[in-house]
Image (spheres, rainbow, N blue to C red):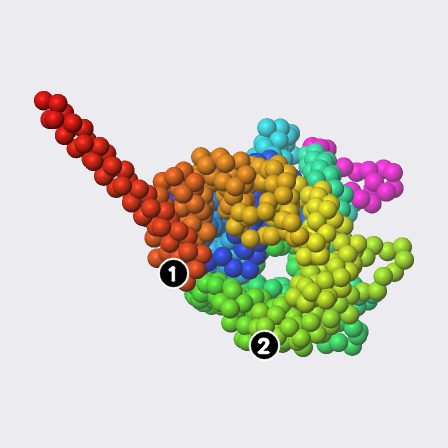
Amino acid sequence: MEKFNVYSAILCAVVAVCYHNALDCGFVFDDMSAIVENKDLKPRVPFINLFWNDFWGTPMHMEKSHKSYRPLCVLTFRMNYMISEIEPMSYHLINVILHAVVCIVLMKICTLFMKEFTSFLAALLFAVHPVHTEAVTGVVGRAECLSSIFFLAALWSYSRCTGHKSKTVWPPLIYTVILVTIAMLCKEIGITVIGVCCVYEVFIVQRATFTECLQIIISTFKGKPVLPSWFKDSVIRCVFLVGTTMFLMVARIKVMGAQLPIFTRFDNPASMEPFPTKHMTYNYLLPVNSWILINPSHLCCDWTMGTIPVINSLLDHRNLITLLFYAILARFVVFMLSQQNDRNRAVIMCLTMIILPFIPASNLELKAILWGCMGVLLLTHGTKTYMRNFDWKSEYSLFRSALKVNQQNAKLFNNVGHALEKDQNWSKALEYFQKAVSVQPDDIGAHINVGRTYNNMNMSTEAEEAYMKALHLFPPIIPGRSYTARIAPNHLNVYLNLATLMVKNDSRLHEADKMLQTAVSMRPDYVQGYINRGDIMVKLGRMKEAIEIYKTALKYEPDNADVYYNLGVVSLELKDKCSKTLMLVNNLNKPLEALPYLNTLLQNYPDHTKGMMLLGDINVNVQKDLISADKHFKRVVELEPDNIQANHNLCVVMVEKGDLFGAEKCLTKVYNMAPNEKYIINHLNIVRTKLNQAIKARREQKLKQQDHQQHHSKQSQTKN
C-alpha cells in the first residue's frame, strides 16, 4: 500500500509538470459551443433541463440536436460556472485533476493482471501520452476523463463480485451496473465497459483458453454441451451485465427520441460511399489510429472531411497497410488465446481496453534496451504533451497547428478563418475561407463563410455571389425523401444572409421575404427565419402579419428573447410604421398590448436591457409609473454603465418628477459621456431654462414676500 501511495504521488507530480501550462489556455474549438454558448450552465436554467438536452444545450427531441447525451459532464461544467462563470482556468484545472485520477485508477486496475511496478509504468506512460492533450487540455474532453474514471471503477467493482470457479457476490455486481450507468451519462462510450467485464470474466478470472471456449461452442451446437464447472456462474454474471446494457441502450434511444443525429458527407465522407470504398476506408482508419498511438508526433484537433481521402481502388497501396495491421493483430490474438499465463492475460486486457504500454509484460529480451526505450518514450511523450498544450492556447493556435499536419481538411481552414473573424481581421479570414472552398469546392458552409466575410468588408456584390454559389450546391428536392436529412441545419443561414443583403434595398423586400419563406418551408423550426420575416413585414408596414409570424416562432422556441422583444415593439405601432428605436416617446398607439410580451420576456430574461428600456418608456409615457420606470432604467445602467440612452432616460424621469436640480446634474453627466448627441444638449438647455425660470420665479416671490413684510412693518409703526 505504501508503494501504491508513492506511485500515485509520482503520477500526480508528472501530470502537474506536463499539464501545468494547460491552465493558461482559453476556450477553443468545441469548448465555445459546450461551455461559453451553452445556456444549460446558467443558474437560471432549470436543473432538470440537463437531462433533457444534449451536450451542447439543445433539446434532444429537436432534429438539429447532436444527440450527444452527457448530462453528468454538463453538470460539472455548471458547477464550474457557479464558481468562476466563464473563467477558463478553473475548467482546465478540474480537467488536469481528473486526468491524474484516471492515471491512479488505471494503475490500480492494471494490478489485476500485472505486477504493481509494471502497472505503475503503464499508468506513467498513459499520464504523459500526448494524444491525451485532446481530452485534458480541451475542456470538452472532460467527458472522456469522467467516463474513464467510472469505466475503470466499474471494472474494479466487477473484479470484487467474481472469482475463479466461485459464486456471484451480488452487491459489487450491482455497484458495477450503477458505475456503468454513471460512466455512460458522462460519455456514451462508457457503456462498453460491459464488454471489458465479460472478457475479464472469461479469460482473466476463469482463465479459459480459446480451445476450451471452442469446445463449449461445438458441444452446444451438437446438442450435448460439455460445460466446465465455472460456466454457469459466469454466464449468470455476464447475462446480468448484458441485460442491463440492453436496458440502458433502450433508455438512451428513448431519450434521443428514437432519432439518430444528422451528419453530412463532410463530417464522414466514407459513410456516403458504396461498397467496397466505404469498407476499405473504414478498415484503413484502424492502422492510422494505431500509428498515432505509437508515434503521436502529428496531432490534429479535427480529422473530418477530406483529411483521409477515401480508398476507391483495390490497388491503393494503403490497403497493404491495412492487411499488415490485421496480420499483426491476428498474431497477437493467436498469442493471447493459445495458452494461459500472466503475459497472455495482460495482452488480452491491454488489447481489450485499447492501450499499448504492455512491453514490460512481454517476452522480449535485452531488458536494458527495453528500459532505454521506455525512458525515451517517457521523455519524448512527456515533452510532446508539454509542447502540445501550447497549441491549445487559443483557437487560432490550435487550428494553425492542425493545418501543419493536415492540409486536406476544409473544416480546419474554416476554423482558422473563424478565429481571425473574432479579431475582425477580415482580409486574412477571407484567405482561409477561400482556401477551404478550394480544398472542398462543394462545402456549402465554406461559401457561406466567404459571403459573410465579404459582407463584413462592405463588399455586398461579392457577398451575394458567394451566397448564390452556396445556394446552388444544395441537393435537389427528391419526392418522398426528407430534405432536412440531407443538409446541415446551419446551411440554411445562406437564405438568411441573402435576405439580409436584399433588405438593404427597399425594392427587394419581397424578394428577401421569398428567400425566408423557402428557408422555413425546408425547416419549419427555423426560428431565425421567422424573426427576419417578421422584420421584413414591419418594414413593409404589415404589422398584423409581423405579429402572426413572431407568434409562429414562439411555437418552436417559447422562451426566445428576441421574439418577445420584437412582439413588444410591434405592439407599440406608430401612426404609419413600427419604430424599433429605444426612444418611443411620441405617437404611441395601443402600447398596453406590448406589456404581456415584455413582462414574459423579463420573467425569462430578467437582465434583457432592451426589454427593460422599452418597458421603462411605457412606464413614463403611458402609465405615468415613474417609480417602475426609475427602477428599470437604473437596472439597465447597472448592467451597462455606458448606455447613454438609459442614463438619459433616468434624467427624463427626474424631469417628470419635477426634480429640475437633479435632472440638470444628471443631464450634465450624460452630456459629458456623449458630447456629440444633439438631443442631450437640447434637453439640457431646456432643463436649464426651466431651472432658471424657476429660480427667477422664486426670487421674485421672495422679493414680493419681503416687500409685503416691510409694508406691514411700516403700517404697524404708523399706528403706534
Label located before the other in sequence (1 or 2): 2
Q: In this view, does 656 lie above or below 508?
A: above
Residue shown at 70% from the left, 49% from the top = 543
Residue shown at 61% from the left, 37% from the top = 592
Numbered circles on residues, count: 2
Q: Nearer the viewer, mark 1 or mark 2?
A: 1
User: Which quadrant holds the N terminus?
Assistant: top left
Residue 674 vs residue 330, the one in the foreground:
674
User: Which quadrant holds the C terminus?
Assistant: top left
Does residue 412 belong to the magenta stretch? no
Residue shown at 43% from the left, 40% from the top = 656
Residue 260 vs residue 1, the one in the foreground:
260
Residue 429 vs residue 197, the one in the foreground:
429
The secondary element bearing badge 1 is classed as loop
The numbered dot on residue 210 is none
Question: Which picture quadrant has residue 334?
Answer: bottom right
Residue shown at 85% from the left, 61% from the top = 477
Q: In this view, does 646 lie above or below 402?
A: above
Q: Name the residue under label 2.
A: 431
Q: Name the residue under label 1.
A: 675
Q: How far apart are marks 1 and 2 (CA)?
A: 40 Å
Residue 326 position within the rendered picture, expressed as x and y whole percent measured from the top left: 71, 64
Q: From the viewer's perspective, is 498 left or right of 370? A: right
Please identify the residue farthest to the front as the structure is shown: 718
Question: Which picture quadrant has residue 654?
Answer: top left
